[in-house]
Amino acid sequence: MVLNVQELQRHFIEFFTNRILLCSIFSWFIAQFIKIFTGLRRNEKTTMLRFLVGSGGMPSSHSAVVMACAFSTGILHGFNSAYFAIAAVLAVVVMRDASGVRRESGKQAAAINLLSRELRKNWKDFVEVTLPELLGHTPLQVLFGALLGILMAFVCQYWFFPMIF
């Protein structure tokens, strides 16, 4: 199958005007932007870049993205559609993972880092290992991310996109 220039152009335009994808991306940016202020408020010692692209923190950008995707799908295709059902199930899986498995991994990383520091004190030849500890989210961070995603879906689909598309 050979694609001609017009088909490639059409696919390119369809990709960059996909309202569900754009809303999900906007939700990620907004969540990451909010993390700057919630992180500064908590006096977290890290770089601005870490707030903008890192994982963990308030609100959960994972939750915001998947809920924006699910609710945008529901708005555009109907909340009784198979598309919404698939997006909603995947959203629940991602949010459960963000507050469960990934959070527990962060707790394990903190314990390993503590052990590594203690070993370094006792054995000078030991090379200290530092693992990232802020991997997952608290249930409250996931909830606020989900609420942000739902809000963004409605703002994007009913207010922002009708102005530009």
Image (cartoon, helix red, strand yellow):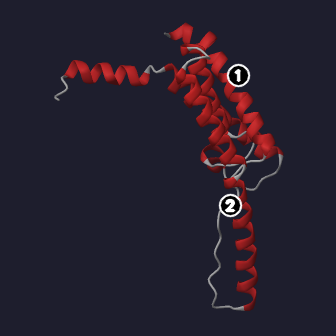
Residue located at (82% from left, 51% from top):
43
Residue 129 badge: none
How far apart are the two marked residues, 1 and 2, measured between alpha carbons? 30 Å
- Whether residue 26 appears in this view of the structure is no
- For the question of whether residue 83 can be seen, the reply is yes
Which percent across, then down, holds residue 88?
62, 30
Quadrant containing the N terminus in the rendered view: top left
Would residue 41 appear left or right of 95 to someone viewing this image?
Answer: right
Q: Examine the rendered structure and indicate whether residue 4 appears above or below residue 50.
A: above
Q: Which residue is mark 2?
A: 105
Dot 1 alpha-carbon crowd within 10 angstroms: few under 14, some 14 to 19, many 20 or more: some
Q: Which residue is mark 1?
A: 151
Q: Earlier in the sequence, mark 1 or mark 2?
A: 2
The residue drawn where x is 57% and y is 23% is: 84
| Res. 103 image quadrant | bottom right
Query: What element does badge 2 sit on?
Result: helix
Q: Nearer the viewer, residue 73 or 14?
A: 73
Q: Residue 105 location in percent, x, y?
A: 68, 60
Q: Is residue 109 left or right of residue 12?
A: right
Mark 1 or mark 2, whichever is nearer to me: 2
Q: Residues within 10 Å of mark 2 (few under 14, many from 20)?
A: some
Q: Where on the picture, by quarter, is residue 120? A: bottom right
Q: Note whether 149 is above or below 10 in the view shown.
A: below
Q: How far from the left and from the top, in percent, is residue 101? A: 68, 54
Q: Residue at x 70, y 73 (%)?
A: 112
